[in-house]
Image (cartoon, rainbow, N blue to C red):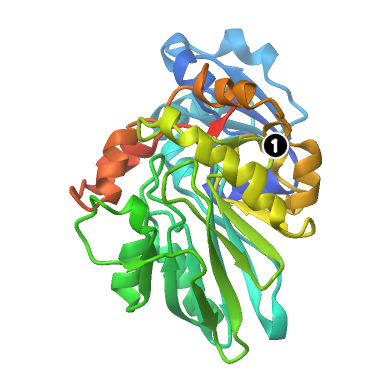
Amino acid sequence: MTVTAWTAAQVARKVIENKELFILDVRNEDAFKDWKIEGHKFDYLNIPYFELLDGVDEILPQIPAEKEVLVVCAKEGSSIMVAEMLSDAGLSVGYLEGGMKSWSMYLEPIKVGDLNNGGELYQFVRLGKGCLSYMAINGGEAAIIDAVRFTDVFTDFAKEKGVEIKHVFDTHLHADHISGGRHIAEKTGATYYLPPKDAEEVVFDYTALEDGLTVTLGASEIEVGAMYSPGHTIGSTSFVIDGKYLLTGDILFIDSIGRPDLAGLAEDWVGDLRETLYKRYRTLAGDLIVLPAHFMIIDELNEDGTVAKRLGDLFAENHGLNVQDEKQFRSMVTDNLPPQPNAYQEIRIVNMGKVTPSDEEQTEMEIGPNRCAVR
């Protein structure tokens, strides 16, 4: 039997198209429990590589013959060896090129919908990390919001669409992933915007992202309006695009709400978080489509792979928006929070421009699941 190399893009299509897949993950048990490739119809077997050094005979009965089988490890080496052993035993299997490292880095661009006068809005879904970035295009121009560090993905996509990147925004100073925003701006000559209340320690030039700021895209003047919405950070800012879409950054997710503790100021910011979620957002139209900067679980993906839902539906269904007792809300967002993101303090310093780690160091900083939400 042959061993097939799978790209992260091929695995992403299995997730988005809701296909079946059996994954043999040969990383250590703690790594697997902390973070794995999530799929609606995926089945898993976790056997650490070192337990398979003497052969795979004992696990053969646990591997289904009727499903596609993918072997996964951290960086690919161990998965190739295990896949070859399974192939020698008569199974047709694949391995993930680049391992979980490549899965963490992959971005899938998906069209969210149309804007007025021929514009389009795209969501870039980073399935392995839960990050969501956006590009609005119209009239030959583009605006990017919450770009991750893989700048070529965005510049190449803009080139493919025949548009010039004019505006780049970060909704806040990110703590769980390294932003590519200012680097895209430097590369393209675009204006880079950052909320000034989050930028007190940054060491680079930026344009202040102020409440009420509006920029236009192309001749048809699609508005990208900024709305101050603190709580996850003191500068967190939301966007209403074209009167249709609400980009909430890390304040509001589909299945949860943002955590206020990643700068060590949970007690100080919990009031701002509640004010944003229970007052500021309540003034907005319920038919706005919420587009967050992250997702937590695979069930938050729609059938087309996007992460999006009506604001009115979230007011009805999202538990974090329905805690009427303020004391209980305060407890929910300050007590018993999930573990903080891997290297989040170092990532904040990188996003301030104070240090510039190597690509390998940046990859290690970002490894692991998204942990921006209250659960």
Q: Who's the residue at 42% across and 45% down the image?
A: 234
Report the residue at 44% width, 47% height from top: 105
Residue at position x 23%, y 50% from top? Answer: 201
Residue 208 in the image: state x and y as whole percent: 36, 66
Residue visible at 53% across and 14% down? 47
Observer-nearest residue: 171 or 134?
Answer: 171
Q: Amino acid at mark 1?
A: Leu
Say which residue label 1 marks. 321
List x then y, in percent, for residue 101.
Answer: 41, 39
Residue 1 in the figure: left or right of residue 99: right
Residue 253 visible in the current orientation: no
Q: Residues within 10 Å of mark 1 (few under 14, many from 20)?
A: some
Instruction: List x then y, in percent, for residue 175.
Output: 38, 41
Expressed as whole percent of the image width and height from the top left, the position of residue 353 reads: 22, 53
Determine whether 214 is above or below 37 in the image. Answer: below
Given residues 144 and 10, the one toward you in this image is 144
